[in-house]
Image (spheres, helix red, strand yellow):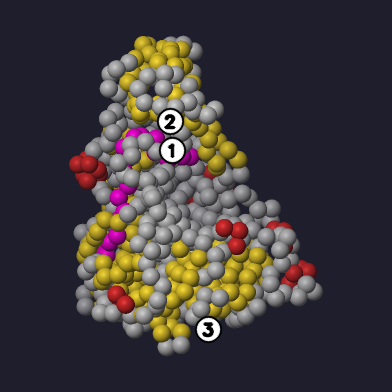
């Protein structure tokens, strides 16, 4: 309930971890599904979700005990068709389980679903006991119980995320035995409620203000408090539509367990215009302050800074200063933001990115330190910005080292404020963008980095590191990686002590450790199976990592077989229940095209401005093209050809020329 992701088990330690071997690999999940969750071990059983199903596995052998399917045409195994729970449940409304995990209490397994529902299953049989909607009865497309449920004192606590849809986030407490809602609290206050004054009075922005809850809560039963973290305001990039600090988005909320009454809040980002979700669970720990232990709650802000707050009052336990931040009048930005004094971010800062450089034609802008207009802005249009990516992957905390362990990916995006306030997208179509995976230990006593090392990060639009971390009293830090590797490190120094390659790249869950029959196991979902390890396990590493995109690849994204290239793109963004559109004058369509050797490519200006398209190496030019004008260029040399707009040199495109004829 504290979210430390720390285990007191120590039979596997720094001295013998090299003896870890595979104990078992579970049967592959049905329908080709993969699992991204943290398994839960209870009474010799491992519980995990994958695809549309919940699985109970024997923790010693990995053999299935029962399976429950949320698909409308499949009934859970072992369930009598006359079950009252099934008769009274609208099974067709049950959707896919979330990717954060499950909770157990009172002999039940609690699962959050992608349509806003929570279901409870009998722990021993998999029988459906109850189903409860925590959102609207006619579920909106993106209302999701995203975090794992939390059980405490006969109640189940969940948050509702919104996927940037037109709805408010909320937190819900339900009776564990029946699913009946005990209380609910919206994360954006309505008129007459405290905090509503931080939203504009000239529109109804508060009604769809965001504040989605993406992670699981933490509970302090002694204090009678439950703690949630909330996400960004909505519309994400349209600060002009919602002037004010926009409570209680990007905040930590402390609520009474029994009533849901708000005791205190702490806002980490006021008036967020960066999509700076608080996307990692809060951690409850005992902080050492001036030689004394204090009950604390810790949270990692999306820019990689760690905050530690008094668990009773919400006041910072370590000094926090208000810093002036760059202003953008068109976004109604606020003058200052809070920063922990002397702390360090786990992500690259603006100075680091300046040293690495950005693609020619672009300029660098940062959330808090940019000398230019901070992104996202309508003008200038060529600003690349570090993404606030310290989220998704849950932190761990070891009471022995007093370190927090966190991972994230440092990467740049091309955020722009569209004329449509509801259009929302982070473009990554600038060539040569790189990703740097960061794994760091943060000293809770200083807020500074104790150690840090680079790790592999996936290449793509949003290269998040998703697997959570695990520490043990054996002095170990376990993590899974997107290249299919599972590793154990010295929690004190970060030195890698053991690795195991599963050969399952791309989809990976979070490790859990448990004891069964006197042996300590470590289990991790990797791709379509769960892998479990113990000392002396006989399954060996494959030593074969799957082929992954290389950082050196300048362009990535789909390649279209066509000899027609337009200067302007119609871009789409799924927002809420519909699709929003953005006519992008500075993006070629397609971004990457493929033709056979000798083909003529037609470049047409379908925008409102004049454009001159030129080869990056200067070997050809279309000449100036007014709107609707065309030009044809012959490509006789096989290979990859990069071009830009001479007038807007941050607009890049690529033509791939093949030796043989391309199948159309």
The residue located at (37%, 19%) in the rendering is: 636
**In front here: 663 or 264?**
663
Q: Is residue 462 left or right of residue 323?
A: right
The residue located at (43%, 76%) in the rendering is: 23
Magenta residue check for 419 = no
Q: Mark 1 — residue?
A: 557
Q: How far apart are labels 2 and 3 at the CA level?
A: 53 Å
Quarter of the image that includes the N terminus: bottom left
**First in residue order: circle 2 vs circle 3:** 3
Q: Which residues are magenta?
A: 424-447
Q: Tags 1 and 2 in contact by the CB under 8 Å rule?
A: yes
The residue located at (25%, 79%) in the rendering is: 15
Q: Mark 3 — residue?
A: 43
Q: Mark 2 — residue?
A: 592
Question: On the image, which quarter does residue 377 sit in?
Answer: top left
Circle 1: element type: loop
**Farthest-out residue, front:** 660
Circle 2: element type: strand
How many residues crowd around disc 1 within 10 Å: few (fewer than 14), some, or many (20 or more)?
few
How many residues crowd around disc 3 within 10 Å: few (fewer than 14), some, or many (20 or more)?
few
Quarter of the image that includes the C terminus: top right
Circle 3: element type: loop
Q: How far apart are labels 3 and 1 at the CA level?
A: 46 Å
């Amino acid at each position: 309930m504290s979210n430390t992701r720390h285990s007191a088990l120590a039979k596997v330690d720094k001295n013998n971890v090299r003896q870890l071997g595979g104990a078992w690999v579970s049967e592959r999940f049905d329908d080709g599904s993969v699992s991204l969750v943290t398994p839960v071990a209870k009474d010799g059983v491992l519980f995990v979700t994958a695809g549309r199903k919940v699985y109970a596995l024997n923790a010693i052998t990995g053999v299935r005990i029962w399976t429950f399917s949320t698909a409308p045409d499949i009934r859970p195994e072992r369930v009598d068709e006359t079950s009252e729970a099934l008769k009274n449940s609208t099974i067709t409304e049950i959707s896919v389980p979330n990717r954060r995990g499950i909770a157990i209490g009172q002999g039940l397994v609690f699962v959050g679903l992608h349509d806003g529902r929570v279901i409870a299953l009998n722990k021993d049989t998999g029988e459906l006991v109850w189903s409860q909607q925590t959102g609207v009865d006619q579920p909106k497309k993106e209302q999701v119980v995203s975090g794992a449920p939390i059980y405490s004192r006969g109640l189940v606590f969940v948050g509702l995320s919104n996927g940037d849809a037109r709805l408010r986030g909320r937190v819900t407490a339900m009776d564990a035995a029946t699913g009946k809602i005990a209380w609910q609290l919206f994360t954006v206050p309505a008129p007459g409620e405290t905090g509503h004054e931080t939203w504009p009075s000239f529109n109804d922005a508060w009604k769809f203000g965001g504040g989605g809850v993406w992670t699981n809560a933490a509970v302090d039963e002694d204090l009678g408090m439950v703690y949630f973290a909330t996400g960004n305001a909505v519309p994400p990039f349209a600060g002009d539509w919602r002037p004010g600090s926009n409570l209680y988005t990007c905040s930590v909320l402390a609520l009474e367990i029994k009533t849901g009454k708000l005791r205190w809040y702490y806002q980490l980002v006021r008036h967020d215009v960066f999509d700076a979700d608080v996307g990692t669970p809060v951690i409850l720990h005992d902080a050492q302050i001036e030689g004394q232990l204090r009950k604390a709650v810790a949270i990692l802000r999306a820019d990689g800074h760690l905050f530690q707050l008094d668990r009773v009052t919400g006041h910072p336990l370590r000094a926090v200063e208000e810093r002036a931040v760059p202003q953008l009048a068109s976004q109604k930005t606020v003058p200052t933001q809070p920063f922990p004094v002397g702390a360090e971010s786990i992500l690259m800062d603006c100075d680091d990115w300046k040293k690495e450089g950005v693609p020619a034609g672009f300029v660098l802008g940062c959330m808090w330190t940019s000398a230019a207009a901070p992104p996202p802005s309508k003008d200038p249009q060529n600003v690349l910005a570090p993404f606030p990516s310290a989220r998704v992957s849950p932190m761990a905390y070891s009471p022995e080292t007093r370190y927090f362990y966190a991972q994230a990916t440092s990467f740049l995006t091309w955020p722009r404020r569209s004329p449509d306030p509801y259009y929302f997208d982070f473009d990554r179509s600038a060539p040569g963008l790189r990703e740097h995976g960061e794994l760091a230990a943060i000293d809770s006593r200083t807020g500074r980095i104790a150690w840090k090392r680079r790790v592999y990060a996936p290449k793509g639009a949003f290269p998040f590191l998703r697997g959570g971390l695990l520490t043990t009293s054996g002095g170990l830090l376990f993590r899974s990686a997107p290249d299919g590797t599972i590793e154990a490190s010295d929690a004190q120094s970060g030195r890698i002590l053991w690795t195991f390659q599963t050969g399952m790249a791309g989809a990976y869950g979070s490790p859990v450790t448990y004891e069964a029959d006197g042996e300590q196991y470590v289990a991790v979902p990797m791709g379509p199976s769960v892998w479990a390890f113990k000392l002396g396990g006989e399954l060996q590493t494959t030593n074969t990592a799957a082929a992954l995109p290389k950082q050196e690849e300048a362009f990535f994204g789909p390649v279209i077989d066509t000899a027609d290239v337009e200067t302007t793109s119609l871009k789409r963004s799924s927002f809420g229940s519909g699709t929003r559109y953005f006519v992008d004058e500075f993006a070629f369509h397609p971004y990457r095209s493929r033709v056979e050797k000798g083909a003529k490519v037609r470049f047409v200006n379908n925008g409102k401005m004049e454009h001159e398209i030129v080869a990056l190496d200067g070997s050809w030019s279309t000449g100036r093209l007014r709107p609707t004008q065309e030009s044809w260029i012959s490509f006789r040399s096989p290979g990859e050809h990069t071009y830009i707009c001479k007038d807007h040199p941050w607009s890049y495109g690529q033509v791939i020329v093949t030796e043989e004829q391309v199948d159309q």
